[in-house]
Amino acid sequence: MTISDRPPSPTPSSHGTPGLRSSGGLFGPVRRNPLLSFFVLANLLSWLAWTPYVLSENGLGWWSYRFPEVLGTSQFTGVLPGAYLGPIVSALVVTALADGRAGLRRWAGRMWRWRVRWHWYAVSLLGVPGAMLLTGLAFSGGQIAAPSMMAVAAYVPALLLQMVTTGLAEEPGWRDFALPRMQRRFGPLAGTMILGPLWAVWHVPLFLTEWGGWPDADWTRPVVFVVFCVAFNVVMTWVFNSTGESLPLSMLLHVSVNNFASIMWSQTFPTITGERPMQAMAAGSVVAAVVVVLGTRGRLGYRSPTG
């Protein structure tokens, strides 16, 4: 079975709009194949938007233009526009076409599920940095340094900024739109293992830019990144399912990793350089994924829909 398969919907057209859920017409292929449509559209929109960045001096250098830096990085001007255009916009469009207003309400509703048990906030806010510290200690041979006061002061503001940039751009697509459908179609573990590589592939053009360490990064970095995405996606699914499909918690978990990696990692573990930081993150994610799979017996906190 492929991700293009869609079970027949038992519900009629909503709000008196004839043919809204019909499989015919111009948008019939989208309604019949919402998952495939989402993945194609998300990649197409993001990759097109990232093309100037890839071709610029921030990437391959074929275009004599350098994207301006904001807060010391060109990612806000070169990467973020394409990130916003991809998963979240694609999820919005495909949901509207495939599921109508009722689907949009369900999709948007998960974005406001903040009220979950406090320990899930602890997992994201404290568990992630703690796990990354343990991983760093293992890879550094126990060598650790105290971060600067500037890094400590920037940690929470940077986390909040990541929530409305990386978190908001990606998670309404990958977790809010795609994951529930993947789990219904393939089951929690198989659906998660399929979604992980697709999530990783979306990032591929960025490895030809500063974002991915171009031109100095080793060819193994994208491969290790795929391993990280597949493994960490298992943890993401577990948190998403266990919090009643809370998108804010998924966003927080995602950006907690990014934030610690960008703000704290190089200062805390200055001896872990080159390709080793990505290798460490991948290894830590694999360990966490194995623990989650064994602890949940492969269910990842999933509860089958009723009715």
Image (cartoon, rainbow, N blue to C red):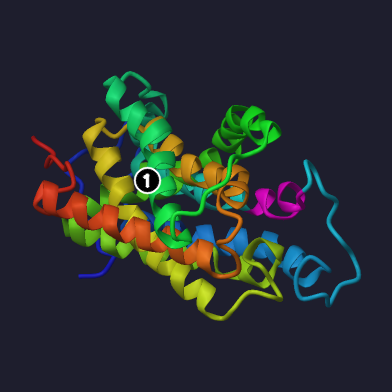
Magenta-drawn stretch contains 81:
yes
Q: Is residue 89 above or below residue 280?
A: above
Q: Residue furthest right?
A: 64
Provide the residue designation for mark 1.
131
Q: Quadrant of residue 48?
A: bottom right
Please tell me whether the stretch drawn in magenta is mainly helix, strand or loop: helix
Q: Is residue 188 in view from this perspective?
A: no
> Can residue 295 be seen by looking at this rendering?
yes
In the rendered image, which quarter contains the C terminus? top left
Identify the residue shown where x is 30% and y is 29%.
Answer: 120
Q: Position of residue 217 (x, y in %)?
A: 63, 74
Q: Which percent across, then down, holds residue 236?
A: 33, 46
Q: Give the tally of numbered discs.
A: 1
Name the residue nearer the viewer: 240 or 293.
293
| Residue 61 part of the magenta-drawn span | no
Q: Which residues are magenta?
A: 73-82
Q: Nearer the viewer, residue 135 or 125?
A: 135
